[in-house]
Image (tube, grey):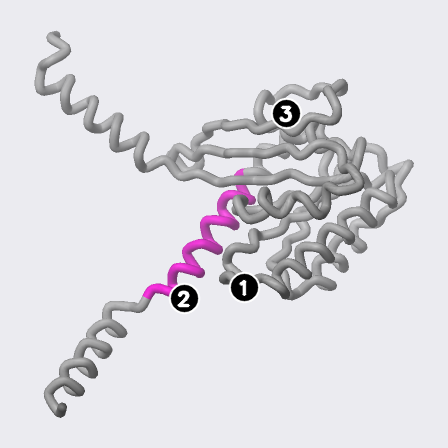
Amino acid sequence: MSSNSPTSAANKVILKRKKSSLSEIKITVLGDRNVGKSAIVVRFLTKRYIIEYEHGIDNRYRHEILIDNEPVIFDILDISSPSSSSIANFDASLCGSDILLLVYSITDRPSFCYIRTLLRHIAQLKATSTTSSSTIPLVAIVGNKNDLIHLRQVSSEEGEILCTEYSELTTLFVGEVSAAEMLLHQMFVDLYKWVKKSKAAQKAIFTPSLLDRVVIGIKGSTSNGSS
């Protein structure tokens, strides 16, 4: 069959349409040192559990999967271990994300306290922001290393309570996971669905319905006629 045949041309149109209609979610992963942030991300990307990682480097990944038979691109920014200025300087990443995935280790209480510090900073940004609050991303919190419960320092209830303490933010306690689990795939799928649902709700709030537009049009024509 010729590459210039009608069938070939139709396939190209369909392929182009599919590429243009790809959904995308931008996730920024944050957390203290040695909590397993990169292990979680790599497990999702490759289905492999890798222990050793190069520290001190931010990594960005793009990964496509099918969700409900629709292609979705995950744009994931894995922020390296924090420095003294990291909290103050991650604002640009925050504003460009759909969701922040905050990771702590259930075996390391200081890493949990670091998440609280991040939440406090995000809440302050939202309170002082001159732009729409919709620019502040959703926040998901996950406790890693639940395969080491004999070393537990943070209870699962504390993660849930932490979310309620920052009710001014849209937060979700994902639960506890292990980077060795295959269930991590479902966690990322659920995060996408949460973002998609939130965006649809935001659009419904700020987009007038057809009836609203008709009423506004009637009011406008009435005022023009009476002038």
Q: Is residue 198 magenta?
A: yes
User: Percent from the top left, x then y, of residue 72?
Assistant: 43, 35
Marks 1 and 3: which is nearer the front?
A: 1
- In the picture of the structure, the residue carrying the numbered disc 1 is 130
Element on which disc 3 rests: helix
> Marks 3 and 1: in contact by CB < 8 Å?
no
Q: What whole-number distance in Å separates the C-alpha atoms at marks 2 and 3?
A: 36 Å
Q: Amino acid at mark 2?
A: Ile
Q: Is residue 121 magenta?
A: no
Whether residue 176 is visible, yes or no, is no
User: Percent from the top left, x then y, of residue 88?
Assistant: 71, 47
Q: Amino acid at mark 1?
A: Thr
Between residues 166 and 81, which one lies in front from this camera angle? 81
Image: magenta residue range = 189-207
User: Percent from the top left, x then y, of residue 139?
Assistant: 62, 51
- In the picture of the structure, the residue carrying the numbered disc 2 is 205
Q: Is residue 43 above or below residue 102?
A: above
- In the picture of the structure, the residue carrying the numbered disc 3 is 42
Q: Amino acid at mark 3?
A: Val
Element on which disc 1 rests: loop
Q: What whole-number distance in Å separates the C-alpha atoms at marks 1 and 3?
A: 36 Å
Question: Would you say the magenta stretch is mainly helix, strand or loop?
Answer: helix
The residue positioned 63% from the left and 30% from the top of the image is 41
In the displayed structure image, the side of residue 27 where residue 215 appears, left or right: left
Assign the C terminus to one quadrant of the image.
bottom left
Q: Earlier in the sequence, mark 2 or mark 3?
A: 3
> Marks 2 and 1: in contact by CB < 8 Å?
no
Q: Earlier in the sequence, mark 1 or mark 2?
A: 1
In the displayed structure image, the side of residue 221 where residue 152 appears, left or right: right
